Structures are given as structure tokens and as C-alpha cells.
Image (spheres, rainbow, N blue to C red):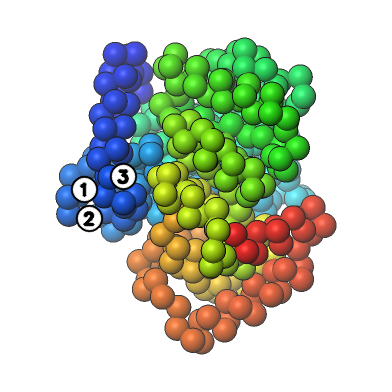
Amino acid sequence: MVRERVSRRDFVKDTATTAATAAGLAMTGGIQSARADAATEVEKTRSFNPGMEYRRLGQTGLWVSAVCLGGHWKRIDKVIAADGPLNPYLAPREELMGPFMTNRHEVVSRCIEVGINLIDLAGDSEPDVYYRVLQGRRDAMYMAYSHPRSELRPPENRRADKLLELFKQGLKRVGVEYADIWRLMALERGGRHSQEDVEEMITALEKAREQGLCRFTGISTHDRRWAQMLMETYPEVIQMICIPYTSNTKVLPEDSMLDTAVKLDVGILGIKPFASNSLFQGDGSPDGPHVEADNRIARMAIRYILNNPAITAPIPGLISPAQVDNMTLAIQERRQLDLAERAELDRASKRAWANLPQQYQWLKDWEYV
């Protein structure tokens, strides 16, 4: 485990050791799930729990839980008794901060207890919230850092020096010297970036690693063709990616971008596993009439996603310790769906596609990958 404050020398040593392990395992075919020869490495991972499954996050060599925590807090108003929906990307107004931070602390604490060991950050408030929640126990979680306002989406940021400076400011703001992973956020349609944008992004990621500002690098995108191009063109920089992957997603029989990811040993975190909650009938209320059925559908969706070994881990946004426990149960259940479960999940997945909000219609582009 990494201490709360790690020296630059220890940082370099730990990163080199992890990279060497990753290279060795990659030579055996990009193995994802723990085997006997990797058991010792797995047991050294953060918040190791023998009841949790761990998968190797591609070239990073990090062993992460088979379900990780997405930073969003959609529907959290149903748990903290807010008087209406809250922005899933921004911290709530002052009068709700107490219940909100208590909830985040309880969810993260339960994740640590059951062995979930990575948080993916994807909103402007999420770094401040989760690094604060982890104060004093920073070594319990890997953090995939992103701060959209400081990355590629604003046109004025699309220079390597600007990206690096904003990244340094972000690390300083949350009180850490480096991020485990800097997975830089681009436009949702990454193909709209110019080649100059891409080169500046890659330069920033390379320099961040060289300067010890992050251990590993990657990107987040909703554009699968762009993601494939980046993996093929910059295989030493794109060590992991965040892409959508739902219960409706199917792998193309030929020329799938996932074939490229496996070949190049790129770890994949799957966002929107529940299609922005369109998979469910309930509204997230812990005492609602659909809780049991929605929990069952959630577990089946996770089991379906984990059947694809190219996906390292789905990253749902969990809003209660009970939802954390439900994800743990999903990992412990048999992986293969029986015929009745497959039919039930298919019905829910069709309902999800029919109920997708307008701003998430793009998820349908990920039905075939």
C-alpha cells in the first residue's frame, strides 16, 4: 500500500515495479482475472478482500475490484431526503452538505470494507469530495483522476502546457502530490478533436508521468472509433480507457475495438452500466416498491458485463451502502445468466432503450462495439 504522503523516490520505485509486473503478465496474453501465479500481487492490492474478485487494469498492472465506484451521485436526493434532484456533477448547496458528505463517507467506507478499491472521478466537484472523504485513508483506494473543466472540453485548454498546469493546480487543491491515474476527459465525440489537439493531449499525459504527477495515463471518450485510433497510435500512453458499456452492448464478431484493447493490453472501465438508471423501474428510493426487482436487474446487468473479459470493471454510481452490498452480491453470484434471467434482463434492457432521456440517446451508439 502507498502511504498518505509518498516520496518521489518511492513513487518511481512503486511505479516501476507495477509496470514490470504488468509487462510480465501481458506476455502471457493480457490476463485479467487473478491466477495462482499472480495471487501474491493481487493480495497486495489496496483494500484487498478475499471475498472480492480482482481484475488487472491492463498495462497499469493495478489489480482493481471487478466493480469499481463511479464518482457520480445520481438520485442521491432519494437517500439524503433532499427536496428535489441534485446535479450529479456538482456538490449540493450548503444546507445539504452535511447529509451529502455523510452519505459519501458511508458509501466509500462500505466499498473499502467489501474490497472495492478504485474510484473514477468524472465531475468538477468529485475530486474535492472524494479526496476529502478519503482523508487519513488515502491508501485504501486507487483514484482515476479527472476534472472536466480543466481538461480538453474547453477549447482554451487544448495545449499541453495549459493541461499540465491545470492538472498541477487540481492536485494541489485536493492536497496530493500525484494521481494514481490521470484519465483525461475529451469531448464526448472525440473524433471532433483536431490532430493538433490529440498531440497536445498525448504530450501532456507523457509529461505528467515523466514528472511524477501521475503513475498511469488514459482517456475517457464516448467515441469508439477515436478510442481505437488512440490505442493503436499511442499504445504506451493509452494504458486504460473509460467507455460506455451497458446490458445492451454486444461485441461485434469482427473488427471490434475491444479486440484492439485486448491485443494492446488496455484496461477498460465501463461507464453507464445501468444506462443512466433507465434500466430500473424505481426511482432509487431505498424504501420504494421496486427496490428488490431493481436490485436483481442491477446484479444481472453486472454479471452480463463481467462475462466479457475485455472489460476490467463496470463503474456504477452507488448512492447507499445497500447498493454497494448488492454489487458485492453480483460478483459472488454465478456469472452466466440462465434462460429466465436472460429473458428478464432483455426486457429491462429494451425498456431502458425506450426510456433513455434525450441527453443519453448517444448510448445507443454503443449497442454494438
Residue behind mark 2: 35
Q: Earlier in the sequence, mark 3 or mark 2?
A: 3
Instruction: Say which element carries label 3.
Output: helix
Circle 1 or circle 3, nearest the eye:
3
Compared with residue 199, is residue 44 higher up or lower down, i.e. above or below?
A: below
Residue 349 is labelled as none
Instruction: Say which element carries label 2.
Output: loop
Q: Nearer the viewer, residue 104 or 191?
A: 191
Residue most toward the right? 358
Asked whether residue 67 is in view, the answer is no
Asked if the residue at tag 3 contacts the one at tag 1, i.e. Cβ–Cβ closer than 8 Å, the answer is no
Cα separation between marks 1 and 3: 12 Å
Q: Is residue 175 left or right of residue 46?
A: right
Residue at point 71%, 48% (across, down)? 82
Residue 26 is labelled as 3
Residue at point 51%, 59% (across, down)? 323
Asked if the residue at tag 1 contacts the one at tag 2, i.e. Cβ–Cβ closer than 8 Å, the answer is yes
Compared with residue 204, is residue 292 higher up or lower down, i.e. above or below?
A: below
Q: Earlier in the sequence, mark 1 or mark 3?
A: 3
Residue 38 is labelled as 1
Q: Nearer the viewer, residue 1 or 309?
A: 309
Asked whether residue 64 is in view, the answer is yes
Cα separation between marks 2 and 1: 5 Å
